[in-house]
């Protein structure tokens, strides 16, 4: 299990433990995963309760735009549910 910080399309972000597998990551976004570049990755480190800011990645649904997923109300420029994961946890 790994701990991720989920940003739902609507509602408040939350921490959740998910299976440490490709399928576990894909289940959160509802499809293939893609690492997205976004300024929010620089400010989300506090969510992991770490004194040293961990390197984090933002994962999204790779086909989110093609599938016309709704805009994420928490993170501008992102569609669908997304999540942050520590880069060290990402295999």
Image: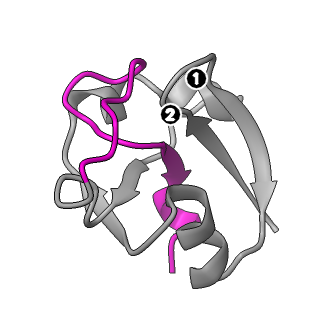
10 or 82: nearer the viewer: 10
- For label 1, the residue is 46
Q: Quadrant of residue 31?
A: bottom left
Residue 87: give x, y in percent of width and height: 46, 60
Q: Residue furthest front?
A: 68
Q: Measured along the vertical axis of the image, is residue 14 above or below residue 88?
A: above
Q: Is residue 11 visible?
A: yes
> In which quadrant will I find the N terminus?
bottom right
Residue 21: give x, y in percent of width and height: 66, 82
Q: Is residue 27 magenta?
A: no
Q: Are marks 2 and 1 in contact (CB under 8 Å)?
A: yes
Q: Quadrant of residue 6?
A: top right
Residue at 53 percent of width and 21 percent of height: 10
- How packed is label 1: few (under 14 Cα within 10 Å), some, or many (20 or more)? few
Q: Is residue 50 visible?
A: no
Q: Is residue 85 magenta?
A: yes
- For label 2, the residue is 53
Q: Is residue 61 left or right of residue 9?
A: left
Residue 67: give x, y in percent of width and height: 26, 59
Q: Measured along the vertical axis of the image, is residue 46 above or below residue 83?
A: above
Residue at 24 percent of width and 49 percent of height: 68
39 or 23: nearer the viewer: 23
13 or 38: nearer the viewer: 13
Q: CA distance from mark 2 to mark 1?
A: 7 Å
SS majority, magenta = loop
Report the label total. Answer: 2
56 or 51: nearer the viewer: 56
Nearer the observer, disc 2 or disc 1? 1
Residue range (magenta): 68-91
């Amino acid at each position: 299990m790994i701990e991720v910080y989920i940003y739902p399309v609507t509602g408040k972000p939350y921490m959740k433990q998910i299976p440490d597998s490709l399928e576990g990551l894909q289940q959160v976004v509802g499809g293939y995963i893609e690492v997205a570049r976004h300024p929010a990755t620089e400010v989300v480190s506090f969510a992991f309760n770490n004194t040293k800011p961990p390197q984090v990645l933002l994962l999204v649904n790779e086909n989110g735009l093609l599938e016309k997923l709704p805009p994420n109300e928490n993170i501008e420029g992102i569609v669908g549910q997304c999540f942050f994961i520590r880069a060290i946890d990402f295999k």
